[in-house]
Amino acid sequence: MTDATSADLIFTKGRVTTLDRSAPAAEAFAIKDGRFIAVGRESEVMVHRGPETKVVDLNGRRVLPGLVDNHLHIIRGGLNFNMELRWDGVPSLKDAMDMLRAQVEITPPPQWVRVVGGFTENQFAEKRLPTIEELNQVAPETPVFILHLYDRALLNGAALRAAGYTKGTPNPPGGEISRDAKGEPTGLLLAKPNAGILYSTLSKGPKLPFEYQVNSTRHFMRDLNRLGLTGAIDAGGGFQNYPDDYAVIQKLADDGQLTIRLAYNLFTQKPKQEREDFINWTKTSKYKQGDDYFRHNGAGEMLVFSAADFEDFREPRPDMPAEMEDDLEGVVRVLAENRWPWRMHATYDETISRALDVFERVDQEIPLKGLNWFFDHAETISERSIDRVAALGGGVAVQHRMAYQGEYFVERYGSDAAEETPPFARMLDKGVKVSAGTDATRVASYNPWISLSWLVTGRTVGGLQLYPSRSRLDRETALRMWTENVTWFSNEEGKKGRIAPGMLADFIVPNRDFFSCPPDEISAITSDLTVVGGKVVFAKADFEKLDETEVPPAMPDWSPVRAYGGYGAWKAEAKKDNALRLQAVACGCANACGVHGHEHARAASGKLPVADLKAFWGALGCACWAV
């Protein structure tokens, strides 16, 4: 075996779902320089074993291609992850309030306790949100901000004071500050119909310093890896400025610390100046600039503010203003002329059909063929609009927002209208490019298995059956929506999404078999082994010793991530980390050590040369010497 054909890694004795139609199943595969070089029978793959090859026995476990989210606000989410108490997956309001109470106890002023989306009241056994009175009782002095989807935010009295909301504060355009009989703010903020008031209020809270944001983003990626994610397309976000708010992710890319492959879209920032934004960006940024880990992917999801139809199904559908078409055409022409693809947020068919009028008009002068543009969300897209999208060579990226808002949609429009909202099965039947994602971290959870469960079972996280069998997907098709199909949306077809020779070596070993587990267990799947580019970025259970990624403890030391981890991890982590949380409260030092947290006794009694303070600090960055 020559060095040129000798593998770095070989995995054997697995049940490998390749999604390669010419060879759909395998028992072994070999990896070299971050790509699959052989996939098939063990005897065929083992010819690539060399003296330095590491061989891993999968012991009959199911292997899947790594999951790729078609719409994730990972850059924005990473900057804030360590500050946020996540209620994603928490089964009862009682559990959620217990977590909140514990977090309030250790959050120092002037910091806020924030629960920023990713959950719905319908997931709770009590089927309700906390009251403002309950929040004030739990946190009389610490500001508490709770974002529920994009329909409302709950603020306790301390948060109202911190945000500066008083009797004299006017309602902003598109939002409402709920008031009592005396005109005083109650603590309830409503999106009517857009989420501007929710964004702007959240932005009033303290931010993490740069080094903490780097740490925070690494922890967010780590939790995504734990759930089996190996890639994502970032959709920008409100109050996310380019390039300033991209400095953290750029540093991680430059330092080789990304564990999620990331394609990013640029989201317009200034109402009435959208065209100028994109003219400037097309001059300073090049489409596809970057590499296989971090690369530019075009424009959106917001192209113009006048076309933003927020999906609050508790409110009537908003009508877009008359200037929408002119605003949109100005931007789309700039993008088409520069051959930049775009993604466009659009919830309702009324918005989609008007946007298609613009796209068709531009296409007559500047052909859109080959641009891989697409609509995001498209919950109520019509048959006619689907055909128009197909004729223009576009696509539709769906997300599992209905898993969190299905109850509200049914309440307003009826169960019949919800049976194909969005009509992903019908779009696939018509040959339209369709893929799946989450739209996390605010309007839904970032857990990809919630989306896969929704596609297969048609149920909301609250248990409501939305879709009949004709509107649901079989498991293989659903998996393709999260792997192979997404590559069209990031212009990476033929590079990833399948386990096949020449493809990027991104794969996972889920903790239960996706293809045979009961349907109601799909949402509970996590990954026991996640590999990106041939590097193990997350491993536990049988594979724990393979993990090559070490992330320092979450910063700051009061971060909710230290006690509760990420999605669903609170169930196991809360008990295990309760002692650490108590150490943090009782510890007299100003900061946790970056290596040991507050476990200074363990550090002092270890074998590391802690007595040589200068050398120890220089080598490991440990602050235990400062106790």
Image: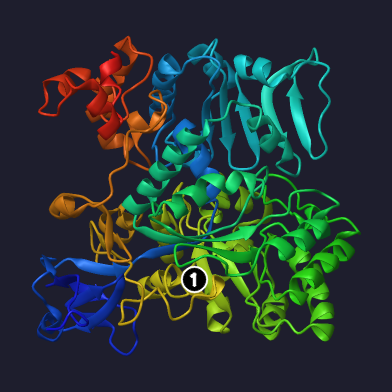
> Which residue is disc 1 drawn over?
486
226 to the left or right of 480: left
Q: Quadrant of the N terminus?
A: bottom left
- Residue at left offset 69%, top offset 30%: 189
Q: Position of residue 615 (x, y in %)?
A: 23, 28
Q: Quadrant of residue 33?
A: bottom left
Examine the rendered structure and indicate whether residue 458 appears above or below residue 101: below
In this picture, is 148 found above or below 135? Answer: below
Instruction: Look at the numbered disc 1 and give the secondary structure of its residue.
Output: helix
Residue 152's quadrant in the figure? top right
Question: Please, is residue 453 above or below residue 186 in the view?
Answer: below
Task: Residue 575: tell me if it is visible.
Answer: no
Q: Residue at x 74, y 64 (%)?
A: 283
Asked whether 465 or 624 is in front, the reply is 624
Question: Does 271 appear above or below 429?
Answer: above
* Relative image position of residue 495 (x, y in whole percent): 42, 77
Q: Residues within 10 Å of mark 1 (few under 14, many from 20)?
A: many
- Pick the residue in front: 301 or 419: 301
Using residue 41 as the reference point, say whether residue 516 is left or right of it: right
Q: Three-letter amino acid code at disc 1? A: Val
Point out residue 389 in the picture as x, y percentages from the top left corner.
Answer: 69, 78
Residue 103 visible from this viewpoint: yes
| Image position of 64 (left or right of 295) | left
- Residue 39 in percent (x, y) is at 23, 81
Q: How is the image coloured?
A: rainbow
**The image quarter in which residue 181 lies:** top right
- Please report the residue visible at 28 percent of the width from the left and 13 percent of the height from the top: 627
In front of the other: 467 or 422: 422
